Image: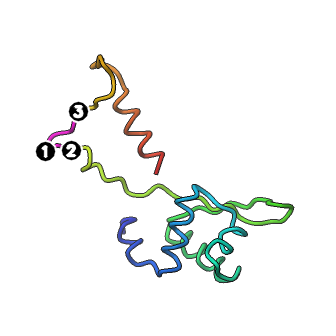
């Protein structure tokens, strides 16, 4: 199942939680449930569900002297159709002189993948 299909099946709370994690780039679980304005128990269940679905990652950490988790987003499916012009790949434009042997375009694509 693709990430898009998984996201379509999320509850409203799970969707809000996933959006919070993605927008923040990572958040401590102790702040996660406070930001969502839910109980710590419900926040833990939301995170657990998102982890099980492979949408976020959770690591043990210590924050403000307490054991908690740090939640980070997992890269989504990338839509490479945005790089297409009809049935051809759009040219990479960004430098005055383009070196045909340069890996700048490949590096740009990889940077897009890691930004997600």
Query: Marks 2 and 1: CB-CB under 8 Å?
Result: yes
- Residue under label 2: 84
Of the residues under marks 2 and 3, which one precedes in the sequence? 2
Q: How many numbered badges does the structure rendering display? A: 3
Q: Quadrant of residue 6?
A: bottom left
| In this picture, residue 110 sits left or right of residue 98 | right
Residue located 36% across and 26% down the image? 103
Q: Nearer the viewer, residue 65 or 93?
A: 93
Magenta span covers which residues?
Answer: 84-91
Q: How is the protein colored in the picture?
A: rainbow
What's the mark number on residue 71?
none
Query: What is the spatial separation of the Cα atoms under label 1 and label 3, in whole angstroms?
Result: 12 Å
Secondary structure type for disc 3: loop
Residue named by callout 3 = 91
- Which residue carries the number 1 mark? 87
Q: Is residue 16 left or right of residue 36?
A: left
Image point (26%, 44%), residue name = 83
Distance in Å between CA atoms under marks 2 and 3 = 9 Å
Local crowd at mark 2 within 10 Å, few (<14), some, or many (≥20)?
few
Q: Are marks 2 and 3 in contact (CB under 8 Å)?
A: no
Give residue 22's position: percent from left, percent from top: 52, 60
Residue 68, located in which quarter of the rendered image? bottom right
Decide: is 7 above or below 100: below
Residue 74 in the image: state x and y as whole percent: 51, 58
**Numbered disc in front, either 1 or 3:** 3
Mark 2 vs mark 1, CA separation in Å: 6 Å
> Please, what secondary structure does the residue beneath circle 2 have?
strand
């Amino acid at each position: 199942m693709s990430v898009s299909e998984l996201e379509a099946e999320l509850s409203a709370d799970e969707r809000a939680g996933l959006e919070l994690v993605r927008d923040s780039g990572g958040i401590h679980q102790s702040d996660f449930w406070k930001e969502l304005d839910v109980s710590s128990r419900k926040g833990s269940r939301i995170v657990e569900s998102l982890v099980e679905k492979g949408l976020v990652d959770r690591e043990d950490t210590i924050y403000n002297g307490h054991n908690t988790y740090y939640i980070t987003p997992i890269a989504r499916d990338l839509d490479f159709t945005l790089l297409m012009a009809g049935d051809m790949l759009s040219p990479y434009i960004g430098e005055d002189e383009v070196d045909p042997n340069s890996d700048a375009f490949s590096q740009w694509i990889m940077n897009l993948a890691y930004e997600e």
